[in-house]
Structure formats: C-alpha cells, structure tokens
Image: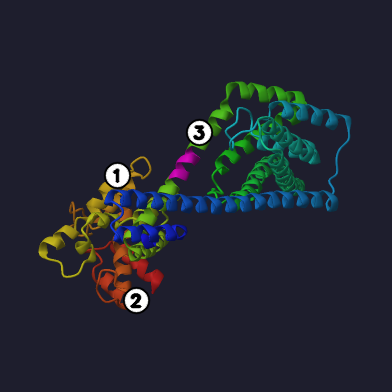
C-alpha cells in the first residue's frame, strides 16, 4: 500500500512502519496517519495536474494572441499591396456616414447570429453591393464598437487588443473576398443583361455566404488553438437568411436611397420577422450539433465494447450509402441510412458477453442472439428526440427476408423498409468478406455468388444485382 503514495512522504512512512513493528502505535493511529499522508499525496498530485493545465492554458492563450496578430498583419498587407478604391462623392459619403452611425449605435456583442438586430453580415453584404470598398471601414467600425463594449464590461486590456486585432484581420480578409466575388458577378452580368437582376441577386447572396464561410473558417482556427470543439457549417443556414436580408437591403437602397433602406430596416426589425427566422434556424443548428455529438458518443461507446464491431459497422455504413446513392435516395434518407447502418448492431450491447462472442452457442443462446435487432431498436428509441423513427424501424427489421421467412414480423418483399433491405444485404456481404460472424472469410467473387443464390429469398434481387454490378 505504501508504495503508491507520494514519494515525498517516504521517510515519514518508514518511521511509521518501524513504530508499528515495535508495537508503539495503535492500529487506529496508523490508519489515521496513513490516510492523512495519502490525502496529502492526492492534493500534491492535483496541484501538479492544475499546474500542468495552467501551463497548457497559458500556451494556448499565447498562441491565440499570435494567431490574432498574424490575421491583423495579413489584413495590413492586403491593404498595402492591394489598395482599395473609394468613391468620395457626396452621396457615397452621406450614405457611409449614416450607416456608420447606425452600426456604432446598434451593434452589440452577440452569440453567433442570435442578436437583437440584423446580423452584421447582412449589412456588410449590402454595403459591398451599395458602396463598394467602404464596406471595409464600416465593418472595422462595427466590430470596434462591439469590442469596446466588451472592454467596458471588464474584458482585460490585452484580450481586448488581441481580439480586436484578430477581428479586424478576419473582417478585412472576408471583405476583400466579398468585393472580388461581387465584382466578378457584375462583370458577368454585362455579358448577359437579360439575366442581370438574377445575377445580381445571386451575387449578393454569394457575397453574404462568403462572409459567413471565411469568418467560420478563421474562427475555427481560434477554437482549434483553444482546444474547443467547433462546427464549420453550424451557422450556414443563418448566413443564408442574412444574405437574403442583405439583398432586400441593397434593393431598398437602390430604389429609395439610404433613407429607404433605413426605413425598411426599422419596419422589418420592428416585426422581428428575420430575427424569428434566424432564431428558428439557430435552434435547428443546435439540434443538429447535439445529434452529431450524440452520434460520436455512441460510436465511442461501441468502440469501448468492441473495436471490431465499430470497424465492421463503418464498412457496412460505407457500402450502404454507396447503394443508397445509386438508387437515388434523397439526402434526408441517406442520413437515416447512415445512422441505421452504423448502429444496426447496437442491440448486441445488451446481450451477455458469451452470446455476443457467438462461438459454441447453446440453442437457448442462439435464440437469444436473434433478439439483437429488437434490443437495438429499444436502445435507439430511448433517444427519440434525436433519432428519427425511420432509423429505429430499419434497425428493428434488418433481419426480415424478402420471401417473408425472416423476423421479427415476417414482412415480405417491398413491405420491408428500403433502409432495412439495404442493410441486410451489405451487412451479410461484409460479414462474408471479413469473417465477422466467426466463420472463415471468403473471396469477393464467392461472397457475391452466395448473395446471388439468396436473391429473391433472403435479399431484394434488384439490390443484389446492383451490388454485383458495382463491385464485380
């Protein structure tokens, strides 16, 4: 027991052991002394761990500041070597001045796109279309106002300077890309004037999405440095909504000038129409994010039980998706197919280890092993808010046979869910190739012949033909 304690207590431990051998210390005092030393050892280990974490955190913060500085210097380089051309006409200056005042007064720190006003993405995308290069100082001004407000709430000066520098860098890089993209669309519109309005619409939406994409990519860099999870596409839907808003703002500016755009903005903002749309989009994004995390967690748990099962499921999923694409399944159905294929054997987690092993099973154990599709459906159904019922249904009926001889409900032919029919075929093909069922693996051609012999009885013959054509 003593050898697992912190080495700094070794001398005192030796003294305690000597005193024990001499009968000079009671058992209770020995127990208290040992527990005290073990507690001190644990505290020392925790302190060491905290120091290690603190060192890692300090390194991450330093790397983040360096990343922000790099973005800032890249933006300076862009402005020096690729100078922008500004329109200094009175109309442009008045427009820029009004928008600048509006941004300074309205922009607040916000989480993603869930703000109380229009996303800055919409305003800057509209500015690119309306006032060109002036979008850059407007963007810098808007984000400066946001960071100044953060600083006033108690943000440290160093973090304020670093964060603002990084934000200016991101904004500059994004707006340069937006200006270039919009210029290309306008150049293209000159060659097909009949579609000029449609091209302009597509250009403004593309500009808004470029802002979203560039910022997402650069922010992912910060999250990676800090060791935090992030989703590259999490706010893309909200970015598309903001792009549509940008088009409407740009249209109102072209039709009624800056005052028309401002009035339009306040009318729409007062109804909270776009805010409600963005909140709904953000809610869906959050749900998708949680589903992805749940998916990863389930994969990790299956790997903990059996790494071989995870590899087998991954192969079945890959082949199932290939067949699903070949038969023209829509994206939503492919997503369900991927879930069902990857977790089609999750019910085996509820079987005893000797039944899961699959070797030398008694008749009773063989009967028990057949329950895994129903058990898997029960497991997945407990996450009904995250996993569609179609996925659960496919997992439950993966052992149905095309001629009605399968289980659990003896379904026949096309009454068996398409996803279940695909999984039954790909599952058994991968089993034959890899020997996952405990039998010896067989060559590809022999496996295909086995499937063809069972076409129409166990498997959907059209799927068997498709698989053979794709693999042979």
Task: Choose the circle earlier in sequence order: 2 or 3.
Answer: 3
Q: Which mark is residue 370?
A: none
Front-most of residues 222 and 435? 222
Residue on which the image places disc 2:
444
| Residue where numbered disc 3 is placed | 280
> Residue 287, position in %: x, y?
45, 40
In the picture provided, is 191 more to the left or to the right than 119?
right
Q: Earlier in the sequence, mark 2 or mark 1?
A: 1
Residue 381 marker: 1
Q: Quadrant of residue 126?
A: top right
Q: Is residue 245 visible?
A: yes
Outermost residue, right side: 89
C-alpha span from label 2 to label 3? 49 Å
Structural crowding at the residue carrying mark 1, measured as other residues with C-alpha within 10 Å and reported as few (<14), some (14–19) or many (≥20): some
Report how many numbered discs are placed on residues in the image. Answer: 3
Residue 469: x percent and y percent? 38, 70
Q: Reply above or below: 78 against 146.
A: below
Task: Identify the magenta region.
Answer: 284-290
């Amino acid at each position: 027991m003593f050898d697992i304690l912190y080495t700094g207590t070794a001398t005192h431990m030796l003294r305690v052991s000597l005193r024990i051998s001499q009968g000079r210390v009671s058992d209770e005092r020995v127990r208290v002394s040992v527990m005290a030393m073990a507690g001190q050892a644990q505290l020392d280990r925790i302190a060491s761990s905290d120091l290690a974490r603190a060192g890692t955190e300090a390194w991450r913060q330093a790397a983040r500041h360096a990343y922000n500085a790099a973005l800032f210097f890249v933006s300076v380089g862009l402005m020096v070597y690729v100078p922008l051309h500004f329109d200094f006409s009175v109309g442009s200056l008045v427009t820029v001045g009004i928008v600048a005042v509006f941004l300074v007064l309205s922009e607040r720190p916000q989480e993603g796109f869930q703000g109380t006003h229009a996303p800055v993405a919409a305003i800057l995308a509209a500015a690119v279309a309306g006032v060109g290069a002036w979008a850059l100082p407007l963007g810098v001004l808007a984000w400066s106002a946001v960071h100044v407000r953060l600083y006033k709430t108690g943000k440290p000066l160093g973090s304020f300077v670093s964060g603002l520098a990084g934000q200016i860098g991101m904004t500059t890089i994004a707006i340069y890309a937006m200006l270039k993209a919009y210029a290309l669309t306008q150049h293209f519109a000159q060659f097909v004037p009949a579609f000029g309005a449609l091209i302009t619409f597509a250009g403004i939406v593309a500009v808004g999405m470029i802002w979203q994409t560039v910022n997402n990519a650069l922010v992912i860099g910060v999250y990676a440095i800090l060791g935090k999870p992030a989703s590259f596409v999490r706010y893309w839907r909200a970015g598309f909504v903001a792009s549509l808003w940008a088009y409407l703002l740009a249209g109102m500016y072209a039709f009624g000038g800056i005052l028309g755009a401002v009035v339009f903005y306040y009318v729409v903002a007062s109804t909270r129409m776009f805010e409600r749309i963005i909140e709904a989009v953000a809610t869906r994004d959050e749900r998708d994010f949680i589903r992805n995390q749940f998916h990863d967690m389930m994969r990790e748990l299956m790997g903990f039980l059996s790494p071989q099962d995870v590899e087998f499921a991954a192969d079945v999923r890959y082949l199932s998706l290939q067949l699903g694409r070949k038969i023209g399944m829509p994206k939503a159905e492919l997503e369900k197919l991927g879930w069902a294929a990857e977790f089609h054997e999750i019910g085996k987690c509820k079987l005893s280890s000797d039944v899961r092993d699959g070797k030398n099973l008694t008749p009773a154990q063989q009967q028990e092993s057949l329950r895994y599709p129903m058990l898997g459906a029960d497991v997945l159904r407990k996450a009904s808010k995250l996993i569609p019922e179609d996925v659960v249904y496919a997992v439950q009926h993966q052992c149905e046979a095309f001629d009605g001889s399968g289980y659990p409900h003896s379904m026949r032919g096309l009454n068996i869910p398409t996803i279940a029919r695909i999984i039954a075929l790909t599952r058994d093909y991968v089993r034959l190739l890899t020997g996952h069922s405990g039998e010896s693996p067989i060559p590809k051609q022999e496996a295909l012949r086995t499937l063809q012999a069972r076409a129409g009885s166990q498997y959907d013959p059209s799927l068997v033909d498709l698989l053979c054509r794709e693999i042979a």
